[in-house]
Amino acid sequence: MNLNAAAPNEFSMLRVITLVTDAQGIYRLTSALCDMGVTPLANVESLSAIQSLLCELPVDVIFCEIRPECCDGLMLPSLLKKLLEAGTLEQLPCIFWTGKTTLNAPIRIVDGGRTISRKTPASQLWIKYLGGITIGALESHARLARAAGVFVEILHEGATQDLGDALRTVLLTRAQPDAKLQMRTFDSLAEDEVINALTTGEGLRFMFQPQFELLSRRVVGAEALVRWNHPRFGEIPPSVLIPLVNRLGLDLLLFSLVEMWTLRVMLALKRENIQIPIAVNASAKTICTPDFADRLAARMQQAQLPSRLLKIELTEDVPEPDELCLSASLTAIRAKGFKVSLDDFGTGAATLHLLANLSFDEMKIDGAFVRGVEQHSSSRKVIEGIVNWAGLLDLNLVAEGIEDESTIPLLHRLGCRVGQGYALARPMELDVFLDFVVQREKNQ
Ligand code: C2E
Ligand code: MG
Ligand code: MG
C-alpha cells in the first residue's frame, strides 16, 4: 500500500497539464499523477502549444519532463513571466521539472585507442543529473526563476512523497489570494493616495533596523526604512510604493521625510550620548538632485549633528546618461563628510561597473547571497569574492538579510564583520528602536 497516496480527491481540483514529448514519458508521468488522484487536462509538446492553451484556460501546475535534447521545460519560466507581464495570464502556473535521475559515469580517458574507466578523487562526490542536466545547474535556474516570481520545483521521477508534498504546497498557495493580481489592481488605483500620503504623512511609518558587529553583537549602525499602511490594502511593501513614488517624481519628498525622522532619531541618541551612523536609502535620481550635498549639510548643521552620522545608501537603477552626474554628487556628498553605501551589491544595478567607477565608503551584500550561504557553495564563494573586493577597495562591508542565527558564525568566517537581518533584529518603530539601542549600550 502506498501510504503517501493522496487522500480521496485531495488534488482532484488541481488543473494540471504536462509538457512531455515522448509517448513513454507521457505514460510514466500520467500514471504517477493518476496514482495521486490527478487527471492531467492535456499533454502539450511545445512552448507555443502551451502559450495558446494558457490563453484559453487557467492552469495550476505544468509538469515538464527534462531531457537534454528538449529545452522547452527550461525556457518555460521566462515564457510564463512574459505572458504574465503582457497581461495574458490571470494566474501564474507552478512548474514542476521531472526526469530520470542518474549519477555521472566515472570519467573515461582514452588510452592508445582503448577507453578505460578511472576513478578520480572527485568521483566520491558524483554529481547527480536529472534528465541529463546536473542538479546543481537546475537548482540555480530554479532559484533564478523563483526570484523572478515563477515557482519552480524539481521532482525526481518516482519520488511519490515529494510529488504529494509539492502538490499539497500548490493547493495551499492557491487558497491564498493572488498577491500579484491584488497589487496590479492597487497600482492603478493608488496614485492620488500616494500623493496624499506623502504630502500629509498619513499612513506612513518610519522604521529603523539596527546593524550589528557580528562577533560582539554591538549595534554599530542602522537603516531607515519606510512603510505605508493603506486604508484598504493594508501594509504596502516598499517594492510597490517606491516605484510609484519614483514614477510620480516624489522621490525627493520621500527622502526628506525619511531624513527628517532619521535626524529625530540621531538627536534622541545624541541625548543618550550614543553616536551611530544611520543610513537613508536614495535612488540615483534623488542623489542627482541639484545641490543635494549642500542641502544635506545645511540640515545636519541646523540640527548640530556631525555629517559622519548620516549615510546615503544608493539603491535602484542608474540610467546610463546620469553616471557623470551621479559621480559628481557622490563625490560632493563624501567631501562634506557623509558616508555613501552601495546597496544590494551583486544584484540589479549594483554592479562591478559602479564599484569600479564611483566612490563609496561601504557596500552591502545583497540578502540573496546571504540567505543561500549555508546551502550553496556558490553563494559562499561569491561572498568570499566580495569580501576580497571590499578589502582591495578599502570599503566597509555589511551583510544584509541574515535570517538564520546559524549563518552568523559562517559569515564571520568568510570575512563579514557587520550584518543586518531578522536573525539579529527586525526593523522597529522609532521608540522601540531607541529603547533597544539604549538598553544594548547600557548592557555593553
Ligand atoms: P534595502 O534598502 O535593501 O532594505 C533592506 C530590506 O530588507 C528591507 O525591506 C528590510 O526590511 C528587509 N530585511 C531586513 N532584514 C531581512 C531579513 O533577514 N530577511 C529578509 N527577507 N528581508 C530583510 P523593505 O523595508 O521591504 O525595503 C525593501 C527595499 O525598498 C529596500 O531595500 C529599499 O531599496 C527600498 N526602500 C525601503 N525604504 C525606502 C526609503 O525610505 N526610500 C527609498 N528610496 N527606498 C526605500
Ligand atoms: Mg538599503
Ligand atoms: Mg539592501
Image (cartoon, grey):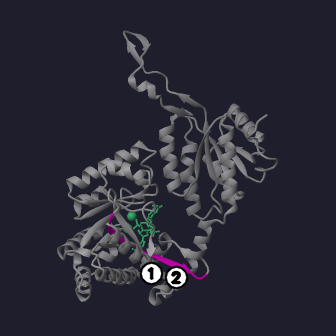
Question: Is residue 59 at all visible to an observer of this figure?
Answer: no
Say whether marks 1 and 2 touch (CB < 8 Å): yes
- Name the residue: 36% across, 56% down: 346
Q: Which residue, given by chain and number where applicable, does mark 1 sit on?
A: 248
Q: In this picture, is 112 found above or below 245?
A: above
- Name the residue: 32% across, 48% down: 414
Estimate the x, y position of residue 63 in percent, counting from the top left: 65, 44
Q: Quadrant of the C terminus?
A: bottom left
Estimate the x, y position of residue 278 in percent, counting from the top left: 32, 73
User: Magenta part of the protein: which range?
Assistant: 218-231
Secondary-structure class at tag 1: loop
Whichever of labels 1 and 2 marks the residue nearer the N terminus, that label is 2
Considering depth in this image, is 100 or 334 the residue closer to the camera? 334
Considering depth in this image, is 297 or 323 the residue closer to the camera? 297
Q: What residue type is labelled 2?
A: Glu
Q: How many labels does the image show?
A: 2
Question: Is residue 230 at all visible to an observer of this figure?
Answer: yes
Label of residue 191 in the image: 2
- Near mark 2 (Cα within 10 A), the count class, few <14, some 14-19 or many ≥20, is some
Q: Which amino acid does label 1 sit on?
A: Leu
Left or right for 318, reference 429? left
Q: In this picture, is 230 found above or below 37?
A: below
- Name the residue: 40% across, 10% down: 113
Left or right for 130, reference 21? left
Q: In which quarter of the image is residue 219?
A: bottom left
Q: In this picture, is 132 found above or below 245?
A: above
